[in-house]
Amino acid sequence: MINKVYQSAREALEGLTADGQIVAVGGFGLCGIPEQLILALRDSGATGLTAVSNNAGVDDWGLGLLLQTRQIRKMVSSYVGENAEFERQFMANELELEFNPQGTLAERLRAGGAGIPAFYTRTGVGTVIAEGKEHREFDGATHIMESGIKADLSLVKAWKGDRSGNLIYRKTARNFNPMVATCGNNTVAEVEELVEPGMLDPDHIHTQGIFVDRIVQTSSEKRIENRTTLG
């Protein structure tokens, strides 16, 4: 059996990173992000990256760290969110941004992983999202064509995984991770708990091991993006 298990996030990315890559990253804000793999990607020194992710986390965590080091050339995302540096770079024309409606982004990732080069959707018709895209009529309604996304490298975070790469996500931390896991030429997963093959209930597996090339067990900091209290 192929050994997919690595001892550290740095080792798990060794030989997989390069300048100019398209890197798809799971997570939503700080929920379900592959935080240790992002740190390892930063430390790899790869530059000119196109990062495909719902957003860029916050200024000092998640993909925000790669914005600080100017390793990201372009963001493909649906939300600028709470990241002031993301906003600043975009407004200063220092960062290219390709906005996607959130559902469209999820479907583009899913389509890329399923080998579907393009699809049509009504979302975005009549807005700047539709500019320059093919339009077609289906059932009397206008649709625009969106392309599937194939990444050079996909980074995901799961709750549990086995040594074969089968993954289980936990609740809302699942978010974009299943789609990101399937669309990468190389997919690396970090997990909180690593078990032996056969120990995961097959009915509970969200991402099958065939999609995962490398896996590493990490400790999560579980930061809170916006703390809300009742007072």
Image (cartoon, rainbow, N blue to C red):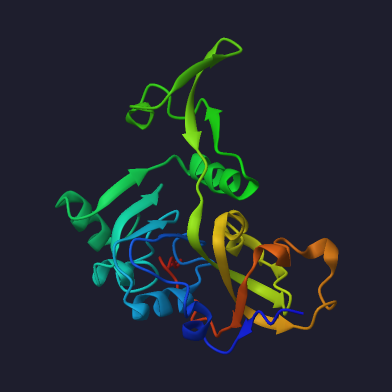
Position of residue 31 in the picture relative to residue 217 (left or right)? left
Quadrant where the image shows the N terminus: bottom right
Residue at the bottom extreme of this rendering: 7
Q: Quadrant of residue 100?
A: top left
Q: Nearer the viewer, residue 15 or 27?
A: 15
Residue in the image at 39% along x and 58% along y = 51
- Counting from the top left corner in percent of width and height, residue 120 is at 54, 28
- Counting from the top left corner in percent of width and height, residue 2 is at 71, 79
- Counting from the top left corner in percent of width and height, residue 106 is at 54, 46
Residue in the image at 34% along x and 44% along y = 98
Residue at the left extreme of this rendering: 92
Residue in the image at 40% along x and 78% along y = 39
Residue in the image at 14% along x and 52% along y = 92
Relative to 124, residue 189 above or below = below
- Counting from the top left corner in percent of width and height, residue 64 is at 33, 67
Q: Nearer the viewer, residue 155 or 91?
A: 155
Position of residue 93 in the picture relative to residue 63 (left or right)? left
Quadrant where the image shows the C terminus: bottom left
Q: How many marks?
A: 0
Relative to 62, residue 83 above or below = above
